[in-house]
Amino acid sequence: MNIEISPKIREACPQLTLAVLACNVQNNETSPAFWSEMEAEIEQIKASYTLEEINKRPEITATRKIYKTLGKDPNRYRPSAEALCRRIVREIPIYKVSMLVDIINLVSIRSGFSIGGFDAEKIQGAIRLDVGTTEDEFEAIGRGKLNVDGLPLSRRSRWNRNTYQRQ
């Protein structure tokens, strides 16, 4: 797997470190056992943070700083990990999508980092961590079309469906 980091991202976040986990899996409906673990994490977040404290988590603070450096207001365009944790504290249910998406959401909630997941069989060419432009389009769950101009995103050189994944 070829992963590139754009010069704009390197400049905005010179200390960036990426981790990649590759595995063979079969996606299914989310199991009750897994969702019990998700619910336990949801309760942990509710017990640990107020709405005003979510963006003070070090990982979320670091991501918000990158958003600001790239010219995007993190209060209007929140990093996905922050948005998930805010939903939890506001007692808005987390979407149950599929086992793989729900695992990514759980890791994001626990870690405070915004995480992307990709189907390697559908990727042709490199994955590029880049900065969105006005030409880029992203359909956000529950929000519709999102303005990703100035937001960090993963760009695939050739992709069968969506071209971008917001970070």
Image: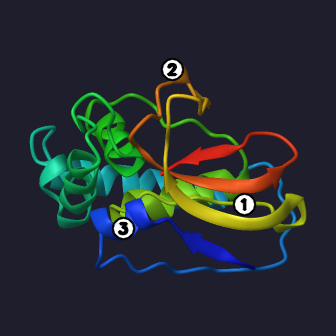
**SS state under label 3:** helix
Quadrant of the rendered image containing residue 85 = top left
Q: Which of marks 1 and 2 is nearer the N terminus?
A: 1
Question: Left of 34 or right of it: where is 1?
Answer: right
Q: Hey, what amino acid is under mark 3? A: Ser
Residue occupied by mark 3: 111
Residue 116 is situated, as x and y percent measured from the top left of the image, at: 58, 58
For marks 1 and 2, give the CA distance: 21 Å
Tell me the crowding category of disc 3: few under 14, some 14 to 19, or many 20 or more residues within 10 angstroms, Cα based.
some
Q: Is 33 in front, or is 1?
A: 1
Q: What is the x, y in percent for residue 165?
A: 60, 47
Horizontal side of residue 47 vs 152, given as left or right: left
Q: Mark 2 points at which residue?
A: 143
- Label 1: element kind: loop
User: How many numbered dots are placed on residues in this image?
Assistant: 3
Q: Name the residue under label 1.
A: 118
Amino acid at dot 1: Phe
Q: Residue furthest front?
A: 7
* Residue 113 position (above or below residue 164): below
